[in-house]
């Protein structure tokens, strides 16, 4: 076999690849990249996982095939199809392999049993061939072709090279199929293995696409693997045990391992999924909410928001009203215990329900939560600007005899601000699906406290910091972000406790 025909995942490593004359072991030699550099092991909240590069994924796949092969001893290419059939669960495959009827296992996975005596026997029952001649007719193009120019699978169906190539190319390029391409013969469900594909396909573009499809289905099928969802990242997270936990890729993106969305504690994956679908369906509404301009509630001048802080001061010199960007109410009472910027008034809504149609009340409720959710999301985007501003401040402080280490608290403060905003954002998704009970009232109080503390930290970092004396800043900022962190922890612990004790009731039909 020519080294160019091998399934290479990295062009530069082509020459260093191990050569092996045994074609049966195609997967082993062809799909195995260079022994990979140490993978990136990580851990968050006692959750162990690795970040894998594209090369390393192939390595993991080959290792998995080898492990099974060491026990079952069938061609590697069949092992790959079997493993894929069991969603790369080795134990499940082994169990079925030794416990049950192997013939039915092979047919279920659409492969010909490697133990079948003379698999080409079947061929002789077909009319188009004669054992005495060295030529036969390709049933696709109807040309009579020497056997040496024909190819087929274990099922015995043979076609000319050109027809195979056209068929496979169309499946790979047009239909995006990799693991699940079946034999070209009508009604035959035997799967085409990777050796056959790579032997027949010469076009580099098609080969590369096929390789991508194979690795992709390996990752997609495997419960312990997930692609990093960041655009153009290409890394894969590999976990020891499947769980709903945050993972951080080497590219810096943190996401939920279970669903791939941004880490969304305290709301559960299923509710978030529902919420995202709802927002997509109502994109007109959410786009309108996400707009960065509103009218001043007092003088009606158009105000544009240019930072994450929600305490607005009207730019109109004759007005200068202080108001809350989210509810457009006066800012001043936002810190008082009686003021509820975060609580949807279900009682008011119930009264309204008697006089208005139900759908309008539901829309009101949705707008309330969507507004707050979108608002924290928007603020989170603005915090990138804040990192820049804080960086300048840190440089300034270093010029005033503070060391690099001493000024790091400012960056930590923005980190805390961002994680609080992210938590708050998802608390509104959680709250949207929540029914009122004693625990939900405690939750809303926790949410209000965290929101209030977060807005204070935000305001402090965005405005006050420039006017304060350098020496006074550190203690104040540290006190504020520590308080925010503690409020965030209280809120999350309370929600998790509720999950454990099953104290949360959910609204139906939203
Ligand atoms: Zn043909
Ligand atoms: Zn066939
Ligand atoms: Zn990534
Ligand atoms: Zn999730
Ligand atoms: Zn105004
Ligand atoms: Zn408000």
Image (cartoon, helix red, strand yellow):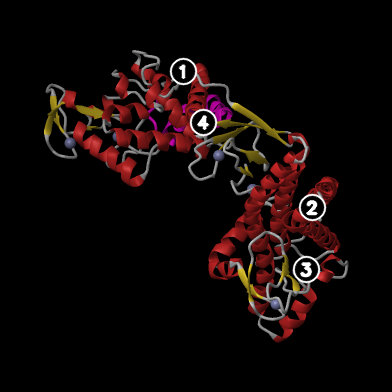
Which one is in front in this view, the residue at disc 2 or the one at disc 3? 3
Q: Which residue is mark 1?
A: 73
Element at label 4: loop
Q: Is residue 508 above or below residue 301?
A: above
Q: Is residue 7 magenta?
A: no
Disc nearer the start of the sequence (2/1)? 1
Q: Which residue is mark 2?
A: 495
Numbered mark located on residue 53 in the image: 4
> Which region of the structure is painted magenta?
88-114
Q: CA distance from mark 3 to mark 4?
A: 45 Å
> Alpha-carbon neighbours of circle 3 within 10 Å: few (<14), some, or many (≥20)?
some
Left or right: where does residue 164 sit relative to residue 81? left
Q: Report the residue at 16% width, 29% height from top.
A: 129
Disc nearer the start of the sequence (3/1)? 1
Q: Report the residue at 52% width, 26% height from top.
A: 60
Q: Position of residue 354 (x, y in %)?
A: 73, 84
Q: Report the residue at 73% width, 39% height from top.
A: 398
């Amino acid at each position: 076999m020519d080294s160019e025909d091998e399934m290479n995942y990295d062009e530069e490593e082509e020459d260093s690849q191990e050569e092996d004359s045994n074609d049966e072991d195609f997967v082993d030699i062809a799909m195995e990249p260079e022994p990979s550099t140490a993978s990136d092991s990580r851990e968050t909240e006692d959750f162990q996982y690795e970040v894998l590069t594209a090369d390393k994924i192939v390595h993991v796949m080959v290792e998995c095939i080898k492990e099974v092969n060491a026990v079952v001893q069938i061609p590697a290419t069949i092992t790959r199809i079997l493993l894929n059939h069991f969603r790369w669960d080795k134990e499940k495959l082994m169990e079925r392999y030794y416990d049950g009827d192997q013939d039915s296992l092979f047919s279920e996975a659409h492969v010909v049993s490697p133990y079948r005596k003379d698999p080409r026997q079947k061929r002789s029952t077909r009319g188009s061939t004669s054992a005495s001649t060295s030529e036969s007719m390709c049933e696709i193009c109807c040309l009579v072709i020497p056997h040496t120019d024909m190819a087929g699978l274990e099922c015995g169906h043979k076609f000319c090279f050109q027809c195979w190539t056209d068929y496979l190319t169309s499946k790979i390029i047009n239909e995006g199929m990799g693991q699940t391409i079946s034999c070209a013969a009508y009604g035959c469900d035997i799967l085409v293995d990777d050796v056959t594909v790579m032997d027949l396909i010469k076009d580099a573009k098609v080969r590369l696409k096929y390789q991508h499809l194979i690795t992709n289905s390996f990752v997609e099928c495997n419960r312990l693997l997930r692609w990093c969802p960041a655009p153009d990242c290409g890394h894969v997270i590999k976990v020891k045990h499947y769980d709903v936990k945050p993972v951080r890729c080497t590219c810096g993106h943190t996401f939920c391992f279970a669903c791939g969305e941004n880490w969304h504690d305290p709301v559960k994956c299923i509710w978030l999924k529902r919420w995202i679908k709802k927002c997509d369906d109502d994109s007109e509404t959410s786009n309108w909410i996400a707009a960065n301009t509103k009218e001043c509630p007092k003088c009606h001048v158009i105000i544009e928001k240019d930072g994450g802080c929600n305490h607005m001061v009207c730019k109109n010199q004759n007005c200068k009203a202080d108001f809350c960007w989210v509810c457009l109410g006066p800012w001043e009472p936002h810190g008082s215990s009686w003021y509820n910027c975060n609580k949807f008034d279900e009682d008011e809504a119930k009264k309204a329900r008697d006089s208005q149609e139900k759908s309008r009340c539901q829309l009101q409720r949705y707008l309330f939560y969507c507004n707050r959710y979108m608002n924290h999301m928007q603020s989170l985007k603005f915090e990138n600007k804040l990192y820049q501003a804080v960086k300048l401040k840190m440089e300034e402080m270093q010029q005033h005899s503070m060391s690099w280490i001493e000024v790091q608290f400012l960056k930590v403060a923005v980190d805390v601000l961002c994680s609080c905003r992210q938590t708050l954002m998802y608390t509104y998704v959680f709250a949207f699906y929540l029914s009122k009970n004693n625990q939900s009232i405690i939750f809303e109080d926790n949410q209000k406290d965290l929101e209030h503390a977060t807005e204070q930290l935000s305001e402090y970092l965005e405005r006050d910091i420039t006017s304060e004396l350098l020496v006074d800043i550190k203690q104040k900022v540290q006190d504020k972000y520590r308080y925010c962190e503690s409020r965030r922890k209280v809120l999350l612990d309370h929600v998790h406790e509720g999950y454990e004790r099953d104290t949360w009731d959910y609204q139906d039909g939203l």
